[in-house]
Image: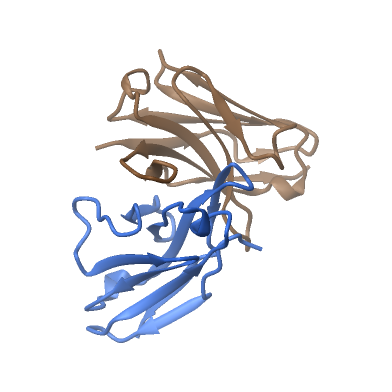
Amino acid sequence: QVHLQEVGPGLVKPSGTLSLTCAVSGASISSSSSNWWSWVRQPPGKGLEWIGQIYRSGSANYNPSLRSRVTISVDVSENHFSLNLNSVTAADTALYYCARLNYYDSSGFPYYFDYWGQGTLVTVSS
Amino acid sequence: QSTLTQPPSVSGAPGQRVTISCTGSRSNFGAGYDVHWFQRLPGTAPKLLIYGNIKRPSGVPDRFSGSKSGTSASLAITWLQAEDEADYYCQSYDSSLSGWVFGGGTKLTVL
């Protein structure tokens, strides 16, 4: 069974950097040619927002609205991937999820989110 | 404002059938991208229910079924049970974003 767990501080100061790590168990990032690894967030009272995703090679894609502030990295030796979001404001306060994208046979975009972490609340406040 | 539109809430009595709609646009459903559905209970990891419009992962009861036509999709839950009370989300790929979009979520109440 694949398990993802978000790890990181629950409180970040404004203008600082939000850093989270997603520890993966039950699957090997380095062996998973059919998977991408993603971050999604949900601000209180608002909808879910895709932040970005990364492949085992380190190739990453980001939401254009966050691209200037976000970096997603992967450490295959530690079997985890990480999120860094800089210059944070109160608007970045959210429940942050990590999730796995799995490949399937489709005529459209052939991936879907199959496993998620339980999420971690990050508050931006002084 | 979520890219995919869902009703905020639906309800049904145990044993009944409910459907949750999800409306997209030309850049997601209309472009041929599939809809996926997941269930979220407070404090727990979201759980995949349906992928590829109609496919059920192993372990998901056949009480859950999905469909998609044009720019609309729906999730049907038959034989409602108290344990089905949760938030349900639709999700797809969007060519305008070149990324993933979600519905705003629908809270299912089992009366």
Percent position of residue A50, x then y: 57, 45
Q: Quadrant of the C terminus of chain A?
A: top right
Tell me where residue A45 sits by quadrant: bottom right
The structure residue drawn at horizontal position 53% and vertical position 75%, both measured from the top left corner, is: B8
Image quadrant where one finds the N terminus of chain A? top left
- Give the residue drawn at x 59%, y 41%: B98
Which residue is more in the foreground, B69 or B67? B69
Q: Position of residue B31 (x, y in %)?
A: 51, 53
Q: Position of residue B103 (x, y in %)?
A: 53, 62
Report the side of A4 relative to A63 (left or right). Answer: left
| Residue displayed at 61% across by 61% down | B2
Answer with the quarter of the image where residue A99 lies. Answer: top left
Colour scheme used in the picture?
Answer: by chain
Q: Colour of chain B?
A: blue
Query: Horizontal and vertical percent for residue A107?
Result: 38, 45
Numbered marks: total: 0
Please report the residue visible at 29 percent of the width from the left and 36 percent of the height from the top: A2
Going by the image, does A121 lie left or right of A87? left
Which quadrant of the structure image shows residue A44?
bottom right
Residue most extreme to the top = A77
The colour assigned to chain A within the rendered structure:
brown
Relative vertical location of residue B83 with respect to residue B28 in this rendering, above or below: below
